[in-house]
Image (cartoon, rainbow, N blue to C red):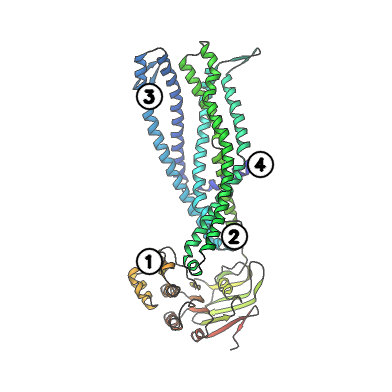
């Protein structure tokens, strides 16, 4: 019971924001329409049971006129007027189609809102970066956003509307069944509406047994979503690193890794198969017995002449509807376990985002006055707590160029991340002039999916950058041969060499015109001549920008007025 309460609380916490959001008006209107159509379907089902009674009574009486009128437009039967089956069926089809259509419209609107807001939270305050560095429990955020949000919306609406239908069906048919079943004498005791009590007992036993048998599916479904996502992520990493794998001849090792992940997937799937087999043995038998059970129970009254054939059929149908409504938990148990796993994963993801956004460790950017980016009293560490740099202070003025050098692994790139305000391990004060634009170019530039134009302009909106400026920037950095491919969509980080990607990053700097430009081995893939050309280009085109470079090559020092060296966990002027 405690677990059910936690599940309901978490599910409500995930669902509630949408229904009180800016889209609440249209969402509630769509939901109301879907509910009304659902209730209409239940109402037509009730009408159909009375139609069945009149129809089978007409068959038993061999009344051909009533039979055909009940098939087509309707007519008098059993002292009342009934619509024909063709009328009921046409109305049912129309309502069923629009009920599904409007429900799907609500699903995609809800999913769109959830996806947008989840992305906003995940990207805000660079929570995605902190989670990737520090949270080993929150696996595969892509799967949680793409799949879990979809499953949550689909299952909540489907199961919620199904439960509502079951409640309305129960209320609608329980009175019909009560009036049809009459009393039952057992040991001198008269039990009124005995078929209702039989349906209640039958469903209660079935629900208890279904939970007992299917409970292992909760854990297994949670694990299956995780191992499926792990396997898919491994395949994506393989796709994104095909050249490195090919150069190393690592196919055999990659195959072993992929098959190991798939083995975990298949082992858990076998567990699901076994648990589902046990549950299906029960639910299939339960359903089969339910199809004949009410006829067996009501048959004595029919054979005694107390119930006509139409009454027997109506009693059987009403019992089936009551029993089916009461057995909603049995029928939907497998989907409920999937929903429980989905809610657990989404709740864990939201909690991880909240913790990441609330974490303020590491130097945090603080806007201020002045013409310099300053880092004061910064101590930077690795995730395991090992100190890389201690009590580091750094100042980069607008218009000056500063070079930082040092041995590999000494903490230069970590310092680069700290100045960007994204490194969460450490402390210190980071001041950035109010309104200043900073651009950070790492050794391996990020090239987003889409057109080459988008890759060149990133992170600017490519639609706002004039075409002639994009073409000129490419020509300036030595990529004129790409000018005619700007609007071609491709996986550009595979099509361009490492050196071409670094040239493209410098084109971004020319387009963005930042106040401060930070470079971390941004020319490491280029030859000395190209490196000198690009440094000369940015110093000429961005004369007022503050430039900080991290580099190993001594020739880079010629383009900088000041050089600092990382040594023994400190940052000092280069003695050379």
Q: Nearer the viewer, residue 567 or 33?
A: 567
- Mark with earlier residue (2, 4): 4
**Element carrying mark 3:** helix
- Residue at (59, 82) in percent of width and height: 565
Q: Which label belongs to residue 85? A: 3
On the rendered image, what quadrant is the C terminus found in?
bottom right
Residue 366: horizontal and vertical position, in percent? Answer: 57, 69
Residue 499: horizontal and vertical position, in percent? Answer: 44, 75
Q: Comparing marks 1 and 2, which lies closer to the viewer?
A: 2
Please give the residue where the numbered disc 2 appears in the rendered image: 356
The correct choice, above or below, for 88 with respect to 237 in the image is above
- Mark with earlier residue (1, 2): 2
Callout 2: few (<14), some (14-19), or many (20+) C-alpha neighbours within 10 Å? many
- The reply to whether dot 2 and dot 3 touch (C-beta < 8 Å) is no
Please give the residue where the numbered disc 1 appears in the rendered image: 464
Q: Which label belongs to residue 2? A: 4
**Element carrying mark 2:** helix
Q: CA distance from mark 2 to mark 3?
A: 60 Å
Q: CA distance from mark 2 to mark 4?
A: 28 Å
């Amino acid at each position: 019971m405690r677990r059910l309460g936690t599940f309901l609380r978490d599910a409500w916490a995930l669902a509630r924001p949408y229904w009180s959001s800016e889209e609440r008006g249209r969402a509630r209107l769509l939901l109301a329409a879907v509910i009304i159509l659902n209730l209409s379907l239940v109402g037509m089902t009730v009408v159909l049971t009375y139609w069945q009674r009149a129809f089978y009574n007409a068959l038993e009486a061999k009344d051909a006129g009533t039979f055909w009128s009940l098939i087509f437009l309707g007519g008098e039967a059993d002292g009342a007027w009934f619509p024909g089956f063709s009328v009921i069926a046409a109305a049912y089809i129309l309502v069923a189609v629009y009920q599904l259509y409007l429900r799907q419209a609500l699903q995609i609107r809800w999913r769109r809102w959830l996806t947008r807001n989840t992305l906003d939270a995940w990207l805000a305050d660079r929570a995605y970066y902190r989670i990737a560095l520090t949270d080993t429990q929150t696996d595969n955020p892509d799967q949680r956003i793409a799949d879990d949000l979809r499953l949550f919306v689909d299952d909540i609406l489907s199961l919620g509307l199904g439960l509502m239908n079951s409640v309305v069906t129960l209320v609608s048919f329980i009175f019909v069944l009560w009036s049809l079943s009459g009393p039952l004498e057992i040991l001198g005791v008269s039990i009124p509406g005995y078929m209702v009590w039989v349906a209640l007992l039958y469903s209660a036993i079935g629900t208890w047994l279904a939970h007992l048998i299917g409970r292992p599916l909760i854990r297994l479904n949670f694990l299956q979503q995780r191992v499926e996502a792990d396997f898919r992520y491994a395949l994506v990493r393989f796709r994104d690193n095909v050249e490195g794998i090919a150069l190393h001849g690592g196919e055999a090792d990659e195959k072993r890794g992929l098959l190991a992940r798939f083995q975990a997937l298949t082992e858990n799937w076998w567990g699901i198969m076994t648990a589902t087999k046990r549950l299906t043995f029960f639910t299939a038998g339960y359903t089969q017995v339910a199809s004949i059970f009410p006829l067996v129970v009501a048959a004595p009254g029919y054979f005694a002449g107390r119930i006509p054939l139409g009454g027997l059929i109506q009693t059987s149908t009403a019992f089936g509807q009551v029993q089916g409504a009461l057995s909603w938990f049995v029928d939907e148990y497998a989907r409920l376990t999937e929903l429980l796993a989905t809610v657990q994963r989404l709740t864990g993801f939201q909690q991880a985002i909240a913790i990441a956004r609330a974490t303020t460790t590491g130097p945090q950017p603080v806007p201020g006055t002045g013409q310099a980016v300053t880092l004061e009293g910064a101590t930077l560490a690795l995730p395991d707590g090992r100190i890389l740099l201690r009590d580091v202070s750094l100042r980069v003025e607008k218009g000056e160029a500063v070079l930082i050098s040092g041995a590999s692994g000494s903490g230069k790139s970590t310092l680069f991340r700290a100045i960007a305000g994204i490194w969460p391990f450490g402390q210190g004060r980071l001041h950035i002039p109010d309104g200043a634009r900073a651009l950070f170019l790492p050794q391996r530039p990020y090239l987003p999916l889409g057109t080459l134009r988008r890759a060149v302009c990133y992170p600017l909106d490519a639609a706002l950058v004039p075409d002639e400026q994009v073409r000129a920037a490419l020509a300036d950095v030595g990529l004129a041969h790409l000018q005619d491919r700007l609007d071609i969509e491709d996986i550009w980080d595979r099509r361009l060499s490492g050196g071409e990607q670094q040239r493209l990053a410098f084109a971004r700097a020319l387009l963005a015109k930042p106040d401060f430009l930070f470079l971390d081995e941004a020319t490491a893939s280029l030859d000395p001549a190209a490196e000198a050309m690009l440094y000369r280009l940015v110093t000429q085109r961005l004369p007022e920008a503050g430039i900080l470079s991290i580099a190993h090559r001594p020739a880079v020092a010629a383009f900088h007025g000041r050089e600092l060296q990382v040594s023994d966990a400190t940052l000092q002027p280069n003695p050379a």
